[in-house]
Image: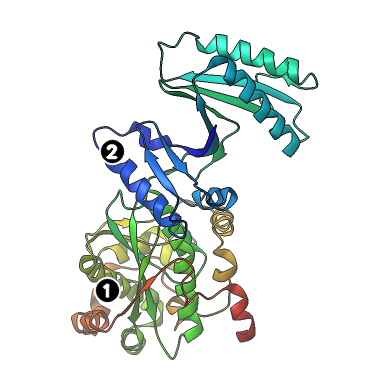
Amino acid sequence: MKEKIMIRYGELSTKGKNKKDFINTLGRNIKQQLEDYPQVTIQREYDFMFINLNGAPLEEVEMRLGNVFGIQSYSLAYEMPRDYSALMTNATKLVEKELEKNPSIKSFKVATSRSDHDYDYDTNTINRDLGGQLAESFPNLQVKMKQPDLTVRVKVRKQDFLLSFDWIQGIGGLPVGTSQNAVLMLSGGIDSPVAGYLAMKRGIRLTAIHFASPPYTSPQALEKAKALTEKLTYFGGWINFVEIPFTETQEAIKEHVPAAYLMTITRRMMMRIADQLRQQYNGLAIVNGESIGQVASQTLESMYAINAVTSTPIIRPLVTMDKLDIIAIAESINTFDLSIQPFEDCCTVFAPPSPKTKPRLDDIAYYEERLDINGLVDRAVANIKVEKIYPNSKNKVQTEDFADLL
């Protein structure tokens, strides 16, 4: 018998003529996740993908596969010759090992599928024969067709049998890189990293952009944004992190715009800059973490006014989500503890006590005439700093690293 990890594609199985491209991208992403295990090899097949460990640690590989978009589920599988009596013997030995690992197993069932429909035995026959063999060998196990403790899965292929047990659920979605590029407006709060994660789940390759306004925002706030970006790299590989100098723009807005419109016009300037960078990085959309009604700049009226500066699609994955649902995702992707560290970002600089929740476009146009909009945007874009962030990067800032700064 040979051990390998068997991967199911899920949504990728519904793709048509370009299915091969999706599968190849998934293979590349898996290889990137496992790049420090060069002995691992990947077999791409039409319905499944197989990972040959060749000595790589199973638990570590399984853990990393849980971060790869495009995987519906996966499991350790045992490849064996297509010998019916050997199947019965091998399956019994493998079930015995499973019972030793998990004594709480009290029930089982056998589930067979065939890619070779010309095989001598149909699925019902294999289920009955193997189920009977296991029931006889393990009299304390109960046969249970609905929600058993252990499912013994047999796949009949032309060249061999594959046997596996219960599947580990993957995170689904589409492999990163199968959709086009977009820029993510990453603030450093709870919402924007979650928005980035959900955009990546649909195959989007992100460039993270972050607005910094020193001395009003601190170096720790910038490092926090980079650390959040690194958290996202575990789900899609490297990400370009773009630091945007925003001090001049915010000071100009503060000087020339009434307090009630500070937030609206600040967000419009951010959107203009984001759109230029979107073009520079060959993106087709801008992603942000806005959710309807969460703050003043996220009313529908405010979103409409802010969107008016661009015709680029604005993707808002969180737009209808409750805060508690967003927090649950942030905790699951390990960004929450970083996000709640109390370092200010641009959105809190000069924040007015009563921002306009229903801004008028004619008022906005009047106030923006006081600003050198094109000059401010061009200078901000011209002076960006770009850094490529990798998983386990040397500049990683963990939550505990912030403790001494609080």
Q: Where in the figure is residue 53, as x and y percent of width and height? A: 50, 46
- Which corner quadrant of the image does residue 124 belong to? top right
Residue extending farthest to the left is 374
Residue 109 coordinates in the image, percent (x, y): 65, 21
Of residue 113 and residue 202, the one placed in the foreground of this image is 113
Nearest the viewer among 313 and 403 is 403
290 in relation to 343, above or below = above
**Residue type of the residue flagged with mark 2:** Lys
Q: Residues within 10 Å of mark 1 (few under 14, many from 20)?
A: many
**Split into 4 quadrants, where in the image is the N terminus?**
top right
**Residue at coordinates 56% horizontally, 35% vertically from top-left?**
167
Q: Residues within 10 Å of mark 2 (few under 14, many from 20)?
A: some
The x, y position of residue 338, in whole percent, is 56, 70
Left or right relative to 393: residue 98:
right
Q: Secondary structure at mark 2?
A: helix
Q: CA distance from mark 1 to mark 2?
A: 37 Å
Secondary structure, mark 1, is helix
Q: Quadrant of residue 3?
A: top right
Q: Which residue is mark 1?
A: 273
Q: Is residue 295 shown to the viewer in this render?
A: no
Q: Earlier in the sequence, mark 1 or mark 2?
A: 2
Residue type, label 1:
Ile
Residue 20: assigned label = 2
Q: Label 2 near label 1: C-beta < 8 Å?
A: no
Q: Give the side of residue 378 with respect to residue 318, left or right.
A: left
Which image quarter holds the C terminus?
bottom right
Q: Residue furthest right?
A: 140
Give how far across and how far down residue 35 sits, in percent: 43, 58
